[in-house]
Image (cartoon, rainbow, N blue to C red):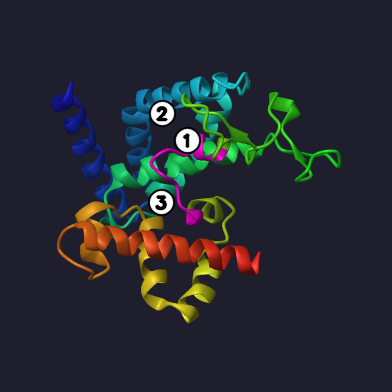
Amino acid sequence: MRTSNNKLWLTVDTLVDQYAEASDKEIKERLFEKIFILLKKYIGTCAGNAVRRASQFRLSIPKEDFISAFNLSLWETVKSFDSHKGRIKSLISYRFRIAEATVWRHYETRDVNEKDGRSYAKARWDSLDKSINDANGDSSASLIDFIITDHPSTEETYLADHELTELLQLFAAKNARYAKIINSLSQGYEGSDLAQVTHEGSNYDPKVRKLVQRAEDSFGKFRSNIG
């Protein structure tokens, strides 16, 4: 299974590179169609997982909503992809997490009776920011933390709202080093690739990991202050 999966992504890598190099519109369309066909099952699996995550909270969101969001996300990712700025697999996974959260946001409605003025009654849930209980009864996590796994950082929310570029320009004026890290994260860099592209090291060691955490924390506070 792992060999088959690796072969799939190697093929996708090749097609994405060909797409980037092609100048003819029809050739690009054919290449993207091949990419889409190759990843159709992957998109369906991701959408199914998203539906199951929602159903755990008695929230009903059609699988088609997630498929549509993931298809658009794939298209936008392939169009803008630069092989020198990360790996297509990690970037697609990153963007799909953002797309999943965006689908949830489409179910948001205004409700003056809610504390934060928002309701998710259309999907039978109160708010993405409402605390939820984990297996240990801890209510410190919110639903948005559950949707976007792998410890989502604040920049993911702003990327979903198409405000990251402008926000990073302001943040860079305050701390260019941290802004470079956040920008690299938004492009899909992770692990050793992130350490190298930001010139912070050759490996994602504890020192770099702590630096990334400080950058995310700083960016989160900056966002809150100007928000």
Q: Secondary structure at mark 3?
A: helix
Image point 32% across, 33% down: which residue? 34
Q: Mark 2, residues whose alpha carbon is within 10 Å: few (<14), some, or many (≥20)?
A: many
Q: Mark 1, residues whose alpha carbon is within 10 Å: few (<14), some, or many (≥20)?
A: some
Q: Secondary structure at mark 1?
A: helix
Above or below, 163 against 131 in this view is: below
Q: Are marks 2 and 1 in contact (CB under 8 Å)?
A: yes
The residue that disc 3 covers is: 79
Image point 56% across, 24% down: which residue? 54
- For the residues labelled 1 and 3, the Cα–Cα distance comes to 12 Å
Disc marking residue 96: none
The residue that disc 2 covers is: 43
Q: In which quadrant will I find the N terminus?
A: top left
Image point 23% across, 36% down: which residue? 9
Q: Secondary structure at mark 2?
A: helix
The residue that disc 1 covers is: 71
Above or below, 60 against 18 in this view is: above
Image point 39% across, 64% down: which residue? 214
